[in-house]
Every structure is written in structure tokens, then in C-alpha cells.
Image (cartoon, grey):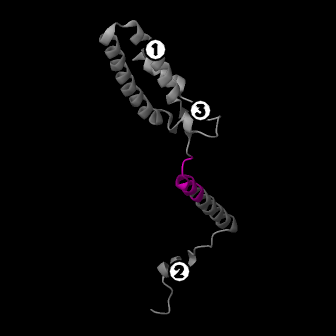
Amino acid sequence: MTGMPNPQDEAVRTVAVSPPSRTVVCLVAVLASALTSAGALLADHLARPVPVRFATLNVAQLFAERQEELMKLAAQGTGEGGTQKAVDLARTFGKQLEVEALALPEACRCIVLVRGAVVAGADLPDYTDLVRERLRQR
């Protein structure tokens, strides 16, 4: 019975896979290209460093303002008591200013420079007023 065709073999022969049409091939190529480009753009965006931002803080101005207030307080006080109170307030002010200055970079997400150290860049944001207000609230 080798010469007789088998119906199962005949069914297998008639089911042939036709090659994909040109339209399908082009669509797959365009989709693959778009996904590759999007992936490359995303990788470039993620690998690019975040630009560094700068701001300033006029520490000298804050100290000068506080020094003026403390000198008035010391002048009003009598003897060692008034002077000691002014010294204690100055010490407290220094600690509070340090806390505020160290917290500022995290709050503004920037590098804070002392205003007197900036030679150029007058357009940099200045946080002196903000720190002054925070120190008054303490």
C-alpha cells in the first residue's frame, strides 16, 4: 500500500503556511524600530546627569542684623547679666543659623553658596529672607 495516497498525508500537504505579506513585515519592522528608538531615548534620559543648581545665603548680613539687636540688648542690660544674656542669645542664634543653613540644600535641592563668595551670578536665587523668617519664628 505504498502507492496509495494516505488521506492524512494529503491534508498535511494542502495546509501550507503562506509567507507574511509585505504589509505585515513592514509594520513589524516599523514597530521594532520605534521601540528601539524609544528605549535608546529613555536610556539616554536616565543616564544624563541632573544639572546642578546653585543658590546663595547672605550669612554676613544675618549676623550683622543679629549683632545689632544683641548690642542694643547688651546696652540696655545692667552689668554682667545683660552681657551674659546677649552672649547666650548669640550662641543660640549661631546654632539655629547652622541648623537652617544645613537644612537649606535639601529644601531647595541645590548647592547653597555664601553670598560673599559669589563673584558673578547675581541672578542666583537668594534664600536669605527665607532663613531670616525661619529664625524669627524660633
The three-letter amino acid code for the residue at tag 2 is Glu
Kindly identify the amino acid type of the residue bearing the numbered disc 3.
Answer: Pro
**Percent position of residue 35, x then y:** 59, 58
Q: Could you tell me what secondary structure mostly forms the magenta stretch?
A: helix
Residue 51 shows in this picture: yes
- For residue 85: magenta? no
Quadrant where the N terminus is found in the figure: bottom left
Counting residues from the start of the chain, the first of labels 3 and 2 encountered is 2
Q: Tell me which residue sits at (42%, 34%) in the image.
A: 102
Which residue does the numbered mark 3 point to in the structure image?
125
Amino acid on which disc 1 is placed? Glu
In the image, is residue 130 above or below residue 122? above
Label 3 and label 2: CA atoms lie apart by 83 Å
Q: Where does residue 138 sit, x and y in percent of width and height?
A: 39, 17
| 3 or 2: mark nearer the eye | 3
Foreground of the two, 87 or 116: 87
Residue position for label 2: 10
Image side of residue 92 versus residue 112, left or right: left
Magenta stretch, residue numbers: 40-51
Precedes in sequence: disc 3 or disc 1: 1
Q: In front of the other: label 3 or label 1?
A: 1
Circle 1: element type: helix
Relative vertical location of residue 92 with respect to residue 35 in this rendering, above or below? above
Q: Secondary structure at mark 3?
A: loop
| Crowding at mark 2 (Cα within 10 Å: few <14, some 14-19, many 20+) | few
**Which picture quadrant has residue 81?**
top left
In the rendered image, which residue does mark 1 sit on? 69
Residue 46 highlighted magenta (yes or no): yes
